[in-house]
C-alpha cells in the first residue's frame, strides 16, 4: 500500500514553468560537484540526514537505482542536509555502502532546487537540467523507475508546449 501511495504521489502532476537549475556543493572529500556536471542524464537529488529514519530506509533503494542506471541514463546525488563534520559523514557513507556521490550542505529553507521543508525530500532533474518532479517523504526505486518510464513514453508522444513541464508535489 505504501508503495502504491508513493507512486501515485510521484505521478501527481502539476504544471510549472521549465527552468534550468544548477548548484555546486562540496562532496565528502571537499571536491566541488555541480549539478550541471550530470547534464545528459536524469539526476535524482535526495536531501537527507543521518538522524532521519525514513532517509535511512530509502538508502538501499537509492543505491540500487544508482547502480542500475549510473552508466546509462540516471544518477543519484545525496545531499546531506545537516550540520555534521566531514569525518563523521564520510564514516556514515562508508558504513552504509553509499555508492552514489554524497554532497554536504547546511540546512536552509529554500535550496537552489526549491523548498526542503521535511526530510527526505527528492527532486528529479531532467537530462536538460530542468526540475521536473519533487517528492517530500521517502522515495522507492520502483517509484523512480515508474516515473522515468512514464517520461520515456511521453517523449514518444506529442511534445508539451514550450516552457511547460510536469512537476511532482
Image (cartoon, rainbow, N blue to C red):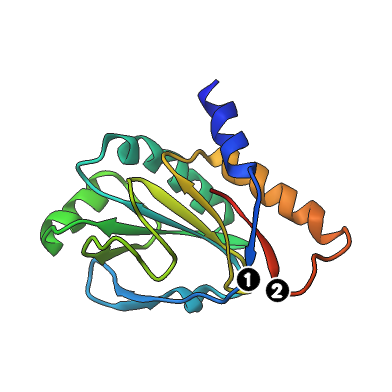
Q: Residue at x 28, y 77 (%)?
A: 31
Q: Earlier in the sequence, mark 2 or mark 1?
A: 1
Give the distance between the C-alpha atoms of the residues marked 2 and 1, in whole angstroms: 5 Å
Whether residue 134 sits left or right of residue 40 in the image: it is left
Residue at horizontal 54%, vertical 41%? Answer: 141
The picture quadrant where one finds residue 79 is: bottom left
At which x and y percent is residue 13?
66, 48
SS under mark 2: loop
Q: Is residue 93 left or right of residue 88?
A: right
Of 100 and 139, the residue lying toward us: 139
Badge 2 crowding class, 10 Å Cα cut-off, few under 14, some 14 to 19, many 20 or more, is few
Q: Tag count in the figure?
A: 2
The front one of 141 and 107 is 107
Q: Dot 1: few (<14), some (14–19), or many (≥20) neighbours within 10 Å?
A: some
Q: Position of residue 151 (x, y in %)?
A: 72, 54
Tell me: residue 63, above or below residue 54: below
| Spot occupied by residue 155 in the image (x, y as percentages of width and height) | 80, 61
User: For the point 59% across and 27% down, which residue is it?
Assistant: 4
Q: From the image, tell me which residue sits under label 1.
A: 18
Front-lying residue, 56 or 91: 56
Question: In the image, 70: left or right of 45?
Answer: right
Q: Is residue 37 above or below residue 131?
A: below
**Mark 2 sits on what residue?**
163
Q: Dividing the picture into quarters, in which one does residue 116 lie?
A: bottom left
Which quarter of the figure is the N terminus placed in?
top right
Left or right of 148? Residue 141 is left
Do the residues bearing badges 2 and 1 touch, measured as CB atoms within 8 Å? yes
Residue 157 picture quarter: bottom right
Amino acid at each position: 500500500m505504501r508503495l502504491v501511495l508513493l507512486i501515485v504521489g510521484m505521478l501527481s502532476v502539476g504544471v510549472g514553468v521549465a527552468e534550468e537549475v544548477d548548484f555546486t556543493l562540496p562532496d565528502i572529500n571537499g571536491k566541488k560537484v555541480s549539478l550541471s556536471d550530470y547534464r545528459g542524464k536524469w539526476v535524482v537529488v535526495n536531501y537527507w540526514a543521518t538522524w532521519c529514519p525514513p532517509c535511512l530506509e530509502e538508502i538501499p533503494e537509492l543505491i540500487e537505482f544508482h547502480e542500475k542506471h549510473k552508466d546509462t541514463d540516471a544518477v543519484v546525488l545525496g545531499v546531506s542536509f545537516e550540520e555534521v563534520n566531514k569525518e563523521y559523514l564520510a564514516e556514515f557513507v562508508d558504513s552504509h555502502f553509499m555508492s552514489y556521490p554524497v554532497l554536504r550542505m547546511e540546512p536552509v529553507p529554500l535550496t537552489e532546487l526549491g523548498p526542503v521543508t521535511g526530510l527526505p525530500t527528492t527532486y528529479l532533474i531532467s537530462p536538460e537540467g530542468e526540475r521536473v518532479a519533487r517528492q517530500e517523504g521517502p522515495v522507492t526505486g520502483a517509484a523512480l523507475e515508474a516515473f522515468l518510464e512514464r517520461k520515456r513514453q511521453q517523449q514518444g508522444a506529442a511534445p508539451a508546449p514550450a516552457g511547460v513541464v510536469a512537476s511532482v508535489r
